[in-house]
Image (cartoon, grey):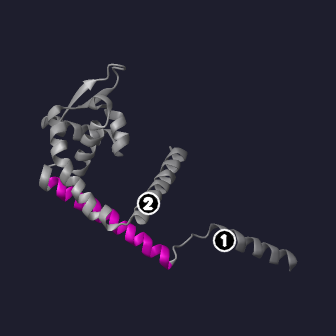
Amino acid sequence: MGRSHRRATAASATATATAPRWLTAVQLEAWQALTLLLALLPTALEAQLQRDAQLSYVEYYVLAGLSEQPDHTMRISELAGFTNAELSRLSHLITRLQKRGYVRREPDPNDGRYTNAVLTDAGYNHLAAAAPGHVATVLELVIDALDDTALSALQDSAERITARINDARAVSG
């Protein structure tokens, strides 16, 4: 009897250790609020950029990322990482931006195996014209909804979650 009680206790402990964790009611509400935000915010930003600048959100993000680089240039493979896009998807996006005259491709002068995306003057000017409307939308929808304490908490939370995602990628990748 003692031995079977120990086995039952060990089995119960193992089952408890492997049992799935579930969200509490408070955690579930927070999670649902975040998932709704993650669904609505990109759509709202995309709508404003499409309406005012004829750019998708990711196109704007690519142009903005290039504008912040020395010589407005970045390897397409690095740009894919920056935008969290697959290289083939980003290559198609660069082609669309190139056809509009906003970006050009050039071989990387340091390593010809790579191709750089270069923001053109037309691309920079289009980005500069689009930025005020985009920033106004970000201010209206996000920044102005938060006081300084909430904004700081949002930044801290976003950075902590991003770090965990990056850590998980590093372990699995």
Find residue 116 and report its horizontal and vertical position in percent. 29, 28
What label sits on residue 152 in the rendered view?
2
Find residue 166 and report its horizontal and vertical position in percent. 48, 48
Find residue 151 and report its horizontal and vertical position in percent. 40, 62
Residue nearer the viewer, 55 or 122: 122
Label the magenta part by its dominant secondary structure. Answer: helix
Q: Which residue is mark 1?
A: 15
Mark 1 Cα shell of 10 Å, populated few (<14), some (14-19), many (≥20): few
Q: Which residues are magenta?
A: 25-50
Specify the quadrant that holds the N terminus.
bottom right
Q: Residue at x 52, y 76 (%)?
A: 24
Q: Is residue 21 above or below residue 77?
A: below
For the residue marked with disc 1, what is the amino acid?
A: Ala
Kindly report the distance in space between the C-alpha atoms of the residues bearing marks 1 and 2: 40 Å
For the residue marked with disc 2, what is the amino acid?
A: Ser
Q: Is residue 139 above or below residue 61?
A: below
Q: Residue at x 32, y 30 (%)?
A: 70
Mark 2 Cα shell of 10 Å, populated few (<14), some (14-19), many (≥20): few
What label sits on residue 43 in the rendered view?
none
Residue 13 sits in quarter:
bottom right
Residue nearer the viewer, 140 or 118: 140
Find residue 123 and report its horizontal and vertical position in percent. 17, 37
